[in-house]
Amino acid sequence: MDAGALTWAEMGLRRLDGRALMQMGGGALWAVPVIVVTVPISAILISLLRVTPDSPLPPAGENTGFALQLLAGAIIAPFGEEMLFRGLATTAWVRSLGVRRGIVRAALVFALAHIIGVAGSTFGETAGLAIIGFATRVPVALALGWLFVRNGSIWSSFGLHATFNAILLILAEAALRST
């Protein structure tokens, strides 16, 4: 009897080999275009809502902390999130809802999950921070879902996610150290 459970292979997790590394590299190439889309969205919303979110990947200011931030923010968190949001959620929703609706639903849940702990000093500030956080994560999540479904591999979306986070971490660290 089939319980409908997903296998690791159905969730896009395949052996980490040369093909997986190529898929990661291909996904990584999408990081800059996705950043180019999200930065103007963020800038427009920050100017309209007059709130500035704290970085979810704050700079450390010293080498050991920065190395740990890269490990956590560009390797561990992206891998776990890709397994949950693309491997499990996107795969299941694509099966039941179709490709477009499955990718969109998983993207919306991904964005929601990233704003759950948002808090400001007033309701208006909290709402503004949540809107900015949600709106800037949706394009990233749509790109992650599209890459995952297109390639049928978690390694493609992981490559984008890891590189996206690494670039933001490096930029934040460079900005902190330049002051």
Image (cartoon, grey):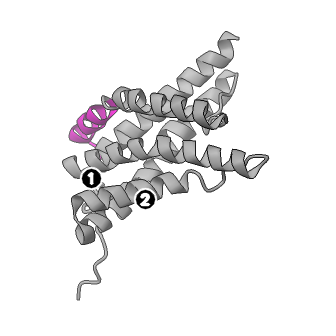
At 25% from the left edge and 57% from the top edge, which residue is drawn?
100
Pointer 2 or 1: first along the chain: 1
In three-dimensional space, the C-alpha distance between marks 2 and 1, rounded to whole angstroms, equals 15 Å
Q: Main secondary structure of the magenta part?
A: helix
Q: Are marks 2 and 1 in contact (CB under 8 Å)?
A: no
Residue 39: image x %, image y %? 47, 29
Q: Which residues are magenta?
A: 15-28
Q: In the displayed image of the protein, which residue is found farthest to the right?
A: 121
Q: Position of residue 4 (x, y in %)?
A: 28, 79
Identify the secondary structure beneath mark 1: loop
| CA neighbours of label 1 inside 10 A, class few (<14), some (14 to 19), many (20+) | some
Side (left or right) of 104 relative to 165: left
Where, quadrant-wise, is the N terminus in this rendering? bottom left
Numbered tag placed on residue 84 in the rendering: 2
- State the residue in front, 89 or 63: 89
Q: Which mark is residue 23?
A: none
